[in-house]
Image: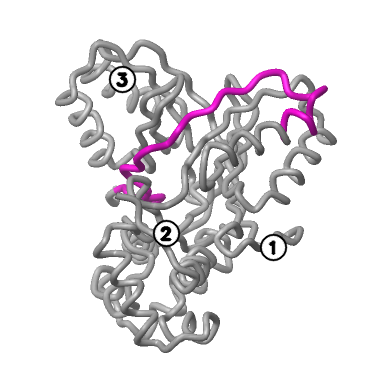
Amino acid sequence: MVIKLDLKDKKILYELDKNCRQSNAEIARKVELSKQVVGQRIQKMIENKLITTFYAVIDISKLGFTVHKNFLRLQNITKEKEKELIEYAKSNPNVVWATSCDGRYDFIFSTWAKDPEHLNNILKELNKKFGEFIYERQIATILKGQYLTRDYLLNKKRNHGEGEVFFGAIPESINLDKTDWKILMALGQNARMSAVDVASKAHISADVIGDRIRKLEKIGVLKHYNFVPNESVYPYLHYKILISLRNNSEQIEGSFLSYCRSNPNIVYVVKALGSWDFEVDVELENIGQFREIMMGLKSHFQNDMRDYSSLFIYQVHKYNFCPSTLE
């Protein structure tokens, strides 16, 4: 059953979306509520499964990886086998994101890979287990990703450059020690984890955790802290739009990105290398809003859009930018 949100809930969610590592006291000052009320409301959202998890946006390229999205169209698959596929993706240390959807594709998952051979080995394992149920697969490599704040929660007009979080795709060589990795894995599992709990997992003093996290933020490894809504009860629909452009010149792409940034319902934009040029994620109240967004895109870019398709995201199963075990 869809959960109704009042204005106080929306204000709290907006602050969690901007930075879910904010303390209850920090959020309370911004939303003009008491620290106790903020804590109670966040806990209720978790208990009602409105929020499934809190995650850290990690620039995987700075860990030496690229991200590849796999779009699967399934065939002759039972509910039991589909559940097995979902559990496989959730438990696989190379899968950073997985979701079920309706539309041209039925299941999408993102893998990180150090190189093409690493990616090939990951997909070979998948094919061995589920190849007979895969009718079609498209792979799109993320060139650049951008998160945008959920300004629709407060009917807020988005200012240019506000609430934008980027991550890239060109692997870099940044030296991280085992403690850094343990911190990233802990925040990947729960970005609101206290410094004491992170310290416990990283086996270091809580006094140095703050410095370590600030260092990872400064060098661009830790980019943002956010929450994952549960689509089955979250009162907003989630669509992913796959868009191909006729001419993907820098000018057209710049205009397209600016247009996306100006829409408060567009929360995620990816420049992809694959069968389409961009992925655009939107969250909105009803199908009518979706039609308005599509009409706006098609009208504004009528000479530039070659093709598009849309997917309805009905359940995110995994969202963890750093799920791997230490090697």
Q: CA distance from mark 3 to mark 1?
A: 41 Å
Residue 236: percent from left, percent from top: 47, 49
| Mark positioned earlier in the residue sequence (2 or 3) | 3
Disc 2 marks a residue whose amino acid type is Phe
Secondary structure of the residue carrying numbered label 2: strand
| Mark positioned earlier in the residue sequence (3 or 1) | 3
Residue 163: percent from left, percent from top: 64, 61
Say above or below: 244 vs 270: above
Residue 63: percent from left, percent from top: 47, 50
Q: CA distance from mark 2 to mark 1?
A: 18 Å
Mark 2 neighbour density, 10 Å: few (under 14) some (14–19) many (20 or more): many
Question: Is residue 96 toward the left or the right of residue 160 in the image?
Answer: left
Give the residue displayed 42% in from the left and 52% down from the top.
Answer: 235
Residue on which the image places disc 1: 162
Q: Determine whether label 3 and label 1 are within 8 Å by CB.
A: no
| Mark positioned earlier in the residue sequence (2 or 1) | 1
Residue on which the image places disc 3: 124
Q: Which residues are magenta?
A: 297-324
Is 100 colored magenta in this rendering?
A: no
Give the residue displayed 36% in from the left and 65% down from the top.
Answer: 183
Residue on which the image places disc 2: 227
Residue at the left extreme, as displayed? 80
